[in-house]
Amino acid sequence: MDSLVNAAARALATGDPLGALKLVALREDAPALALRGIAMAQLGDFPRARTLIRSAARAFGPKEGHARARCVVAEAEIALASRDLGWTEKTLEAARATLEAHGDHVNAAHARYLAIRRDVLIGRLDAARTALEEIDASHQPAALRTVHELMLAGIAIRHVQTRIAREALARAGRAAREARIPALAGEVAAASQVLDAPAARLIARGAEKPLLLAEVETLLTSGVLVIDACRNAVRDAKRLVPLASRPVLFTLVRALAEAWPNDVSRAELVRRAFRARAVDESYRARLRVEMGRLRRVLVQFGDVEATAGGFALTTKRGREVVVLARPMEEEHGVVLAFLADGESWSSSALALALGASQRTVQRALDELSASAKVQSYGRGRARRWLTPPVPGFTTSLLLPAPLPGD
């Protein structure tokens, strides 16, 4: 490569896309096209960046497999940044193998990290953690060590393991300072703020208060009975009963927990569980059936007792009962949680991350758009959705990942 291309590559490595463009903006050869594409990606123009990277891949000859593989990795990174998660893992893995064969271990490691970051985004945390454990990051450049530690911290935050997350973020901060890349340092700072922002609400005995992530972790390992409205489950320090697939039962147990130690009237339970305006004998019979099912679910935690006014929740050994709820509860809260990262998402990427159909996600986005909670730009396959993050709140508990004991 000539001196201008080398200088532009060094500028991009230090996070200076404008400096790189000044050197190669008017050139149309393959290396310059690739560098222009990376520069446009750093500036946030992902469609233009992808076009340039694909042009560069075509411009490299059939014998330049190493350069073409680097273009594949660059395009995968652009797709990840633009939340286009539909790319195939086989293509990226083939490019990684080519880079390894040519001795380009740094870019090969970068390709592995891209695949792991995709796993984190779509909730495949166990696979991501296993892949990270197989990588020895100690000999990687500072920028890649920062990425490695950021992913470890992200997985720990999803699992509500604050000590592990803080240690990983501290290492990420040191690596980012060594790398001297402002964007990486900003990413570490943003991740650190998550640990110091309210992550959930605690509802107990008719009162509520915000909880930090560390306080949530303490709560989940304490001896109280937690009705977890972030995951729709009933749990204590040792056991967990998921109720995400049984929404009526979870609605009933949450209503009883919010009123604990008092009872809840039958009319209120019918209204919340069945959304009925008036209580008749058929609803009362249905309520008795669901309460019988709830008793069987709660047998290892406590019981549900009928009272003169309705029903009350009781626990073994008189344990406290609390409700762990999201910071702000929305009908489509999980969709908002993904969009709250400040990035633009396609509906297909959201569907992949949520494990839902694209049509279901599109309906949710349309409803959120009608209420001005999200906005979109682009048309057709290029359409992207985004919303600014809610100031002062973290959304880590809204995302679909297991908590301790799951």
Image (cartoon, helix red, strand yellow):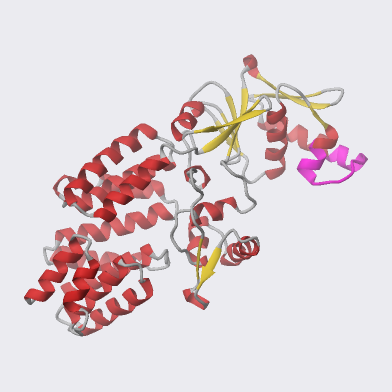
Query: Image height check: is 108 above or below 224?
Result: below
- The verdict on residue 312 being magenta is no
Residue 205, above or below 267: above
The N terminus is located in which quarter? bottom left
Please name whichever residue, 258 or 225, is drawn nearer the observer in this view of the structure: 258
Q: Position of residue 169 (x, y in %)?
A: 30, 41
Q: What's the residue at 57%, 35% (across, down)?
A: 201
Residue stretch in magenta: 269-286
Residue 2 at x, y percent in the picture? 7, 77
Residue sitting at the far left: 3
Q: Quadrant of residue 306?
A: top right
Q: Residue furthest right?
A: 281
Q: Main secondary structure of the magenta part?
A: helix
How many marks on residues?
A: 0
Which residue is at a point 50% across and 39% down the rendered structure image? 199
Residue at the spot 31% in from the left edge and 67% down from the top edge: 43
Determine if the magenta segment contains residue 271. Answer: yes
- Residue 115 placed where, x, y %? 32, 58
Indicate the position of residue 80 as horizontal and vertical percent values: 37, 63
Is the residue 375 above or below the residue 160 in the image?
below
In this orientation, which residue lies closer to the viewer: 99 or 345?
A: 345
Which residue lies at the image location 28% right of the left edge and 64% below the top edge?
93
Q: Quadrant of residue 181?
A: bottom left
* Camera-side residue of 327 and 288: 327
Residue 287 against residue 112 in the figure, above or below: above
Q: Is residue 307 visible?
A: yes
Q: Nearer the viewer, residue 44 or 296?
A: 44
Residue 135 seen: no
